[in-house]
Every structure is written in structure tokens, then in C-alpha cells.
Image: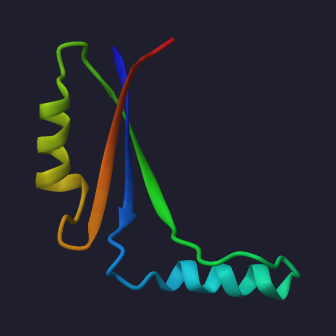
């Protein structure tokens, strides 16, 4: 079995209202120096050893990621 992490973030051109709210909350709590906050998500998959990165990319393009407004990065590893 392999572990695959897909890191999904909004494209830079897309407003991130959740990130804006978190930045405001940090400032309210007295944390200064934070220029911006972008919120993302991690999709964790356990797949068969024969699964290739190209197959995972196909999963992302067809279902896991909204490629119109999101970017993604795939990290493949081995389960311990």
C-alpha cells in the first residue's frame, strides 16, 4: 500500500475569504507581521502499490480538485 497526499489550495487569483477572516482573527489576538493567510486542504489516500502518480493526477482532474479555482500538489509515499 502507498500513502498519497494531495495538497489543494486556491489559485492566487481567487479571493480566500476564510484566509482573510483568519488573518483578521490573528491581528485581533495581537499577532502582527502576518502578511496574508491562504487556507487549503489535504486529501489523504491509501492506494495499491501499482497506483501511479499519473493515475492520482487523473483522479484530481476528474473529481478531487476544482481545477478552475484550485491548484494541487501530489506527494506519494510508502505506508510505514
Q: Position of residue 68 (x, y in %)?
A: 18, 72
Image side of residue 60 versus residue 8, left or right: left
Image side of residue 44 versus residue 55, left or right: right
Residue visible at 29% across and 66% down in the picture: 70
Q: Position of residue 53 (x, y in %)?
A: 20, 30
Residue visible at 30% across and 53% down in the picture: 72
Viewer-nearest residue: 47 or 61: 61
Q: Residue furthest right?
A: 30
Viewer-nearest residue: 47 or 19: 19
Residue visible at 82% across and 88% down in the picture: 28
Compared with 65, 6 (above or below) is: above
Compared with 19, 50 (above or below) is: above
Image side of residue 74 versus residue 7, left or right: left
Q: Quadrant of residue 34?
A: bottom right
Residue visible at 18% across and 22% down in the picture: 51
Viewer-nearest residue: 35 or 10: 35
Q: How is the image coloured?
A: rainbow
Q: Position of residue 30 (x, y in %)?
A: 88, 82
Q: Quadrant where the N terminus lies?
A: top left
Compared with 52, 78 (above or below) is: above
Amino acid at each position: 500500500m502507498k500513502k498519497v497526499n494531495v495538497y489543494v489550495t486556491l489559485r492566487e487569483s481567487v479571493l480566500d475569504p476564510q484566509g482573510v477572516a483568519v488573518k483578521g482573527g490573528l491581528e485581533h489576538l495581537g499577532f502582527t507581521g502576518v502578511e496574508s493567510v491562504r487556507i487549503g486542504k489535504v486529501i489523504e489516500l491509501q492506494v495499491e502499490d501499482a497506483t501511479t502518480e499519473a493515475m492520482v493526477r487523473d483522479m484530481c482532474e476528474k473529481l478531487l480538485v476544482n481545477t478552475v479555482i484550485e491548484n494541487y500538489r501530489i506527494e506519494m509515499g510508502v505506508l510505514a
